[in-house]
Image: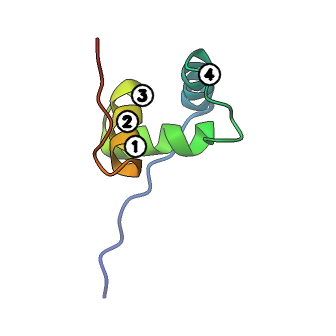
Amino acid sequence: MAKKTAIKKVAQAEIRAAKSFLKRRNIDSDEVSPKKFAKAAKELDKSFSETLKILARELSGGQVWWFR
């Protein structure tokens, strides 16, 4: 029998925080679902900023550079 993985629930407050985070970075909710983004951050156990960097790096094939 396959081992069942725990599904982490995302609270409404986390979804609102993700929506606010994405909005501050001019990323439309139509492009990235705040609920899915919040869930990804929780699953990765990373901040929204770190999660965004990981997603950008993965989607660009590692070609994304972050400058401070």
Q: Quadrant of residue 17?
A: top right
The percent coordinates of residue 30 (x first, y second) are: 71, 41
Vertical arrangement, residue 7 with respect to residue 68, above or below:
below
Mark 3 or 1, which is nearer the eye?
1
Q: CA distance from mark 1 to mark 4?
A: 16 Å
Tell me the number on the disc at residue 55.
Answer: 1
Q: Badge 3, how many Cα within 10 Å: few under 14, some, many 20+?
A: some
Disc 3 target residue: 48
Do we see residue 42 in this rendering? no
Q: Quadrant of residue 57?
A: top left
Q: Badge 2, how many Cα within 10 Å: few under 14, some, many 20+?
A: some
35, 3: nearer the viewer: 35
Q: Residue at x 40, y 43 (%)?
A: 55
Query: Dot 4: what SS?
Result: loop
Q: CA distance from mark 2 to mark 1?
A: 6 Å
Tell me the number on the disc at residue 26.
Answer: 4
Tell me the number on the disc at residue 51.
Answer: 2
Residue type highlighted by circle 4: Asn
Q: CA distance from mark 2 to mark 3?
A: 5 Å
Q: Residue furthest right?
A: 30
Q: Quadrant of the C terminus?
A: top left
Query: Dot 2: what SS?
Result: helix
Question: Which one is earlier in the sequence, the residue at label 4 or at label 3?
Answer: 4
Residue type highlighted by circle 3: Phe
Mark 2 or 1, which is nearer the eye?
1
Tell me the number on the disc at residue 2.
Answer: none
Q: Badge 4, how many Cα within 10 Å: few under 14, some, many 20+?
A: few
2, 34: nearer the viewer: 34
Q: Residue at x 55, y 28 (%)?
A: 18
Question: Residues at badges 2 and 1 in contact (C-beta under 8 Å)?
Answer: yes
Residue type highlighted by circle 1: Leu
